[in-house]
Amino acid sequence: MKAAAAAEPFNSSMPKPSSFDNKPQAPPSIYQLNFDVEHIGKKKPQSKRQATWTYGFPKNTEDGNLILEEHETRLTWSTHSGKYSIEVDGQVVFEGVAKGSVLEYKFIYNHTKGCVGDDSSQAGYTRMRIIACRKPPVRSSTNFRCYEFVIGGRVFRDLARNNQYGEDFHNEDSMDDVGVLSSILDIVDPSWRSAGMA
């Protein structure tokens, strides 16, 4: 977990959470702060990619103030070898090799303790899922989302925004084109919108 100094006070325009009960089946309010994708391959930049999602949990301090505790989940993926790693707050939680053009990994994580859990009923743990693909499929939206992060059962891009961090993502447009594939989730989990993930 990042140092307490990284926690930011709530923006006054943000909705107030009803509780801070961080259970997998009833996650607290989670706010999206930033999303970015970098191409970091040495010879061919696009051969290695790094997707980073930054988000915040509301938390009450001892003096009664409400702050936003900032966290970061990162996927580093070599699309040439298939090797990838997933980090949360700088700690590697999984390393593996993706077979084919689509990568998917699910886990539960305790942001306070900084550890992975093995039981989805454990209090204090949040369900997390990363899905990615090497390139958009044929007949997809021009704004096709190759990288998706699902946290607490919700797609990152559909979480409430903390406005003090800005309104725009840096690499991919968050708007969906009606009637065409707009996300890797449309392929891996076609019912994701009706399932309440949006």
Image: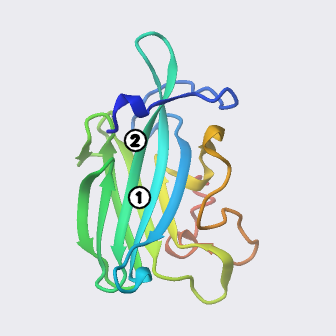
Q: Position of residue 152 (x, y in %)?
A: 46, 46
Question: Is the residue 135 above or below the residue 57 in the image?
Answer: below
Would residue 25 appear left or right of 89 to someone viewing this image? right
- Residue 96, quarter of the rendered image: bottom left
Q: Looking at the image, tell me whether mark 2 or mark 1 is earlier in sequence order.
A: 2
Q: Which residue is mark 1?
A: 129
Q: Quadrant of the C terminus?
A: bottom right
The extreme right residue here reads 178
Q: What amino acid is at disc 2?
A: Pro
The image quarter containing residue 85 is bottom left
**Residue 141 bears which disc, if any?**
none
- Residue occupying the point 24% across, 56% down: 92
* Residue named by callout 2: 24
Q: Are marks 2 and 1 in contact (CB under 8 Å)?
A: no
In which image quadrant can residue 122 be found? top left
Going by the numbered disc 1, the residue's amino acid type is Arg
* Placement of the N terminus among the 4 image quadrants: top left
| Left or right: 7, with 16 as reference point | left
Give me the C-alpha separation between circle 2 and circle 1.
12 Å
Residue 36 percent across, percent down from the top left? 51, 61
16 is higher (above) or lower (below) than 185: above
Res. 197 in view: no
Looking at the rendered structure, the secondary structure element under dot 1 is: strand
Crowding at mark 1 (Cα within 10 Å: few <14, some 14-19, many 20+): some
Q: Observer-nearest residue: 162 or 107?
A: 162
Is residue 60 in view from this perspective?
A: yes
**SS at circle 2:** loop
| Visual colour scheme | rainbow
Percent from the top left, x then y, of residue 195?
Answer: 57, 56
